[in-house]
Image (tube, rainbow, N blue to C red):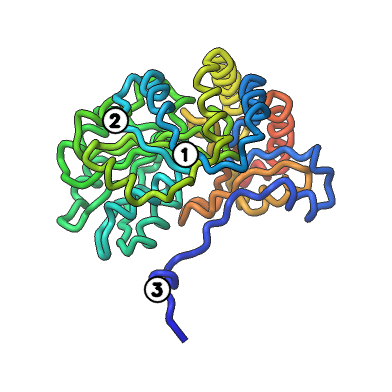
Amino acid sequence: MFSKKKFLSELEEYIPGKSIEDTAREFRLDPKKIIKLASNENNFGPSSVVKKAIIENIKGINIYPRYPTELKGLISKYLKIPKENIVFGAGGDDVLDVLGKIIIDKNDETIITSPTFAMYEFVTRICGGRPKFIQRDENFDVPINRLLSSISKKTKMIFLCSPNNPTGNVMERKAVEKILKETRAYVYVDQAYIDFSDKKYSVSDLVPCYKNLIVLRTFSKAFALAGLRFGYGIIPQHLVKDFEKVRLPFSINNLAIVAAKAVLEDQRYLKKILRLIKEGREYLIKNIKFRTYPSQANFILVDVSPNFAKYIVFELQKKGIIIRNCAIFGKGMEHFVRVSVGTLTQNKKLVRELNSFYKKLDRNFR
């Protein structure tokens, strides 16, 4: 019998946020009444302009998709960056996967600041690399000097997430530039949630200035197209040709291309939704009685101590609210949950149910 690749024994399966369908089935709930606040999706959904564009182009799904070259121009205009630096994938994970294949060799080292998004470790191991974890400080900021001192000759890639998942905090541009200037390794900055943040934290415009900077963006979060899977990278030009060699053909479907084009042309709706999500974020931070952390994303990190996250998550599921157990993000996160910002009605129900657990706590224990 043929053997499997050795790295698979070290790799745990990625467990996504629980679906509405699975929750409804497990707890015998009406799926229409379930609130999903576990996967940082945009619960306001896409605009009528986007929906109309999808419906009008549904007849073309029998045809293989063409490469969406015209979208490079729209993104270039939106971000004010050269279109020559833009590459596409079927979601941000696909872009990350292709970049891993063209950069990370067997036994190469990557640096990952923990807690953060699990896919950086997955891609590193799948490509034969070895992840090195640097623990963030008590406020979940990246310890820049400790990170720099951990860089070795084997370091091929440094993964940074800003705003960070699951903590929601951002890195200053000057901190990112300090790392870029002091290493030859590629610095991968995941900015999937940057649209919910202050524009001053975006580093997309720095890519043409550094040969080792890679930035990830996506249409899944702010643009509400998570189900269509469309992400893009802003990468050094010397990597673009190799990226195009390795990526799978036809990976981006026709409807995703149509929707992305429509959403970029509907900036008025985007601005409205971003305002509502930011207001919802502040509402959650202000009204949740457990300790919350400042966030520049569309989610909030909540410390539910002395409860275990597993207990809180399970009890809320029984009430039709799905949130994320942060124990999956590693050691020390067993008492944390991540809650996505929903609509005002959804946010109010979440606050009410979460605070009911707070009221039950023994004040003397606190």
The CA distance from mark 1 to mark 3 is 33 Å
Q: Closer to us: mark 2 or mark 1?
A: 2
Report helix, strand or loop for mark 2.
helix
Q: Which of the labelled discs sits on residue 362, or is there none?
A: none
Q: Using the rendered view, name the quadrant where residue 155 is placed.
A: bottom left
The reply to whether the C-beta atoms of the residues labelled 2 and 1 are less than 8 Å apart is: no
x 66%, y 35%: residue:
59
Q: Which label's residue is closer to the chain start, 2 or 1?
A: 2
x 46%, y 55%: residue:
330
Bin the neighbour count of mark 2 within 10 Å (Cα to Cα): few under 14, some 14-19, many 20 and up.
some
Position above or below: 56 against 227: above
- Which residue, given by chain and number where applicable, does mark 1 sit on? 167
Bin the neighbour count of mark 3 within 10 Å (Cα to Cα): few under 14, some 14-19, many 20 and up.
few
Q: Amino acid at mark 3?
A: Lys
Q: Which part of the image, by quadrant, shows the C terminus?
A: top right
Q: Using the rendered view, name the quadrant where residue 26 is placed.
A: bottom right
Q: Which of the labelled discs sits on residue 84, or is there none?
A: 2
| Rendered location of residue 19, percent (x, y) | 68, 48
| Rendered location of residue 197, percent (x, y) | 44, 24
Q: Amino acid at mark 2?
A: Glu
